[in-house]
Image (spheres, helix red, strand yellow):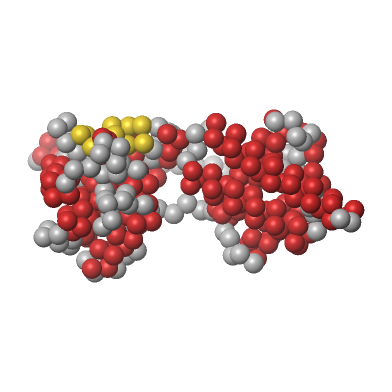
Amino acid sequence: MPGSSRREWRCNVKWQYWITLYIQTHCTARGLRPTTMAAYQATLNQFREFLVSRLDKHDPEEVAAPDVMRYLQFLRNERDNGNAALNRQLVVLKNFYRAVIAMGHLQPSDNPLACFPKIKAAPKKLPVTLSEEEIERLLDVPPTDTVLGLRDRAILALLYGTGIRASECAGLQEEDVDLEQRTILVTGKGGHERTLPLNDRVYGALLNYRTVRGHVPREGAFFQSRRRKGLSRAAIYERVRTWARVAKICKTVSPHRIRHTFATHLVRAGVNLVTIRDLLGHRLITSTQIYLHVSAEDLREAADRHPIGRLGPIVEQLLPNVRIPKQHPPWRRRTG
């Protein structure tokens, strides 16, 4: 094996060792989900492939800040990534290099992202939600004369009635659904658990599905496919999109949009933000504050309720026969 090829082989092994070590130790210790760790690994592999194929840099210790900048330009120009996507890439790369330094494989002075500037964040947009009439059409569209129809009715009712994520819905096990107490146990991001109550409609939908579905072991998935296997996150997205098309909803509908709708409808119903945070499983209240947005109808209703509309009649009632004199400005002194 020639010397250059041997060096490239050693560098590729070093890359793979660092990435694998980061995923299996640092990410696992943080309690990240397997899908999140797979996404991080794909991001790091893509970064490595760019350095090798475009910049001919095989050694991870030779990476510098200009190389990272060229990678971000490649993502923006050739992959059409926006600011939000670039910031996600930067977060993964920064965490990766911090972990490599903490594990003693790289000197802090060799960190290419030590003083790297943050990309300007994309402007936050208000979440698009469904109206109550659209939600009602969506919940009523699956048939009630088949097991799969009752299953999909239960999925849609659960997503809107609790605001859980698609991954949390897919991860529900039989033992997590307590219909006697009318609660479900949800495992969210980072392995954090929360218990959510079920209202009458959600309870009824889950009970009907469990009755016709039949027995499932306690460790088995609550929502079963035709082949008696648990539904994946992608399958739940597909079922939501399918029934939204059948319901003739013009908006793009997804489980996360239903989650936005759940939170927005609670805000309009007067539920306080701390309660909504706990229901959604947010760690920080700042993540929930986006649902404080109001529509034009809400603004008009608030303006109509303003006390200023009642001040004029009140003054007239207090002073029915009194003529209020006009107030003239004081005479100015003549100077000359």
Front position in the image: 255 or 60: 60
**Residue 319 spot, x, y in % from top left:** 13, 38
Q: Residue furthest front?
A: 1
Front position in the image: 172 or 125: 172
Pick the quarter of the image with the N terminus.
Answer: bottom right
Pick the quarter of the image with the C terminus.
Answer: top right
Left/right placement of residue 127 relative to residue 82 reads: left
In this view, 119 is above or below 288:
below
**Residue 253 spot, x, y in % from top left:** 32, 60
Front position in the image: 247 or 323: 247
How many callouts does the rendering have?
A: 0
What residue do we see at 66% from left, 35% from top? 99
The answer to whether residue 279 is seen in the rendering is no
Left/right placement of residue 296 relative to residue 73 reads: left
What residue do we see at 23% from left, 68% from top? 246
The answer to whether residue 333 is seen in the rendering is yes
**Residue 103 spot, x, y in % from top left:** 70, 31
In this view, 170 is above or below 32:
below
**Residue 208 spot, x, y in % from top left:** 12, 48
What residue do we see at 79% from left, 51% from top? 9
Q: Quadrant of residue 102?
A: top right
Q: Quadrant of residue 210?
A: top left
Front position in the image: 21 or 290: 21
Q: Residue furthest right?
A: 3
What residue do we see at 57% from left, 59% from top? 82
